[in-house]
Amino acid sequence: MEVLWIFRDVESAAQAVQGLIGEGFAERQITSLSSVAYPDGVLVSAGAKGWFRQVTLAGALTGACAGFLLAAGTAWLYPVQTGDKPIIALFPTGIVTFEVTMLCAIIGTMLGMFLEMRLPARKAGLYDPEIAEGAIGISVTFTPPGDAAACGADAEHCIALLSIGEQRQRAEAIMKRAGALRSVTE
């Protein structure tokens, strides 16, 4: 279950996030939505490492291998003996290798971008049109009761040990104290 609360300014949204974390919610349960890109940690620390660089690097390495095999393999399979020159020429092979490397790196970059943005979306997330007009949304995902994996190291003060209804009541109280305008539910 997920609930989105709408705030007018960054200060009240940050106060709400700090209240949620102080109450025992894990940072991975809290997400911020805004029309302005705030640095990581202003509202919620993302903390998760993405796949963007690895996918781009994998695309580039795949392209380098494919480009070399294309250029060198073609020269090897269809040898044209020109004087005393090598069958696999260095510069033409290097140029084709470079071009295919860049092509596959760009494709890998686009694929990594879609993975980072989680496109296509499996399900529509919560949203409010006021977010596009400058409001800030704080979304909280409630975990099933007794989910010890959601607690991490601090299981004693973990909110995930409570029922979803109790988690939501505590979150609503914190959000109202921080100045939430309204909530949007699934």
Image: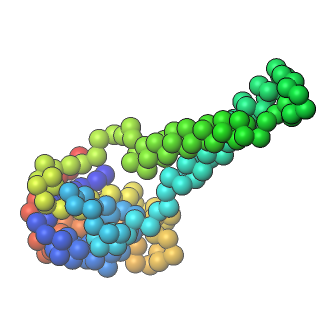
Q: Position of residue 29 (x, y in %)?
A: 36, 62
- The residue lying toward the viewer, choosing from 99 and 49, is 99
Question: What's the residue at 86%, 34% (across, down)?
Answer: 86
Question: What's the residue at 13%, 60% (across, down)?
Answer: 135
Q: Position of residue 131 (x, y in %)?
A: 16, 55
* Residue 24 seen in the figure: yes
- The residue lying toward the viewer, choosing from 106 and 163, is 106
Q: Please, is residue 170 above or below residue 127 in the view? A: below
Q: In the shown orientation, is residue 35 left or right of residue 118?
A: left
* Residue 165 seen in the figure: no
Question: What's the residue at 72%, 40% (across, down)?
Answer: 91
Q: Position of residue 157 (x, y in %)?
A: 40, 78
Quarter location, residue 24: bottom left
Q: In the shown orientation, is residue 154 left or right of residue 162?
A: right
- The residue lying toward the viewer, choosing from 106 and 40, is 106
Q: Please, is residue 105 above or below residue 171 in the view? A: above
Q: Please, is residue 174 above or below residue 5 in the view? A: below
Q: Position of residue 35 (x, y in %)?
A: 20, 57
* Residue lying farthest to the right in this orientation: 84
